Amino acid sequence: MSSASTPPQVAAWRPTARDLVLMATVVVAIAASGPIVAVSTAPVLAMAFWRCSLAAVATSPLAIRESRGVAVSSRALRNSLISGVCLAGHFGLWIPSLRMTTVAASVALSATQPLWSTLVARYEGEYIAKQVWFGLAFAFAGVITVVGVDFGVSPRALTGDLMSLAGAIAVTGYMTIGSKVRQQLPTATYTTLAYASSGAVLVAVMLLLKVPVSGYSREDWMYILILTIGPQLLGHSILNTLVKTTAPTVLGLAILLEIPGSAIVASVWLGQTLHVTVAIGIALILAGLIVVVTARDKRELIEAG
């Protein structure tokens, strides 16, 4: 590795004070998402629909400016819309799970997305280091622990766990397809298409199930706006900025703080307490994800160098 390429990598692994503040903002915004959904009374599908739709409206002006003079192929358009369908599946499964099981369990199971992404990468022929397999084993042991405990607690809690896991698999499709589409389309253009597609799918399901699109309390509208501005726009937008200056491993580890962060918020705000065995399972998931994230990113950094 040449000396000319070394400084940017060193800088990437040592975030500036500004980047640390921005990462803290992202973690707080994302960690508040679960408890907000759990405490609100608006229909869960409605919260998912408005979150995506309002975000699409907010990003559309930038998308229009970015896409001027940019040819959008039919394949890129189709994949963007399919990605949005996956995102709708994620929100349509994960958000309801927050009212069926504990916020901590739901968030931890939803955060297993890196596990499914790793398995997809292996299926596509990517080399997976031994350290990653150890991390997967730890995380899956944690998943089994959490689900096993909730199986004995109630069918409702178990259903919430399984819905959260299914939501993690759905968001893996969103991330996998999106990572390829973003090589062809500007970020805001892709984001707007995916959010709009997700909103369209969710409102179709709402109409089919006769879920009201409006008529919520003022407090619930406030929660919907907070979800849109915080996790959906502020969190993702800052992450897109940090990608240019901070190593993927650092960002990955910062995002994983959502798991304990949500548990703390849910404990203080909602009074939710964790069974000790569930806490152990969540700790195993977190430990396994840390191993997976750090191992994959370090290998990618070496290959890129």
Image (cartoon, rainbow, N blue to C red):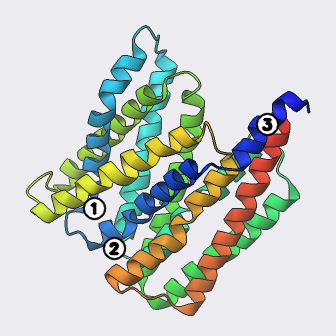
3D distance between C-alphas at marks 2 and 1: 9 Å
Point out the tag, 2 or 1, that comes first from the N-terminus. Answer: 1
Eye-nearest disc, 3 or 1? 3
- Please give the label number shown on residue 44: 1
Is 190 displayed left or right of 244 in the figure?
A: left
Q: Nearer the viewer, residue 289 or 163?
A: 289
Is 89 displayed left or right of 200 in the figure?
A: right
Q: Nearer the viewer, residue 119 or 10?
A: 10
Picture residue at 78% right of the left edge, 44% below the top: 10
Q: Is residue 131 above or below residue 192?
A: below
Question: Helix or strand or loop: what does disc 2 sit on?
Answer: loop
Picture residue at 91% right of the left edge, 29% below the top: 2
Q: What percent of the width, then of the height, locates residue 99? A: 33, 73
Q: What percent of the width, then of the height, locates residue 83? A: 47, 38
Q: Which quadrant of the view contains residue 113?
A: bottom right
Q: Which quadrant of the view contains residue 12?
A: top right
For the residues bearing labels 2 and 1, Cβ distance under 8 angstroms:
yes
- Please give the label number shown on residue 99: 2
Q: What percent of the width, then of the height, locates residue 163? A: 45, 66
Q: Amino acid at mark 2?
A: Arg
Give the mark count.
3
Q: What percent of the width, then of the height, locates residue 192? A: 37, 32
Location of the C terminus by quadrant is top right
Q: Nearer the viewer, residue 31 or 161?
A: 31
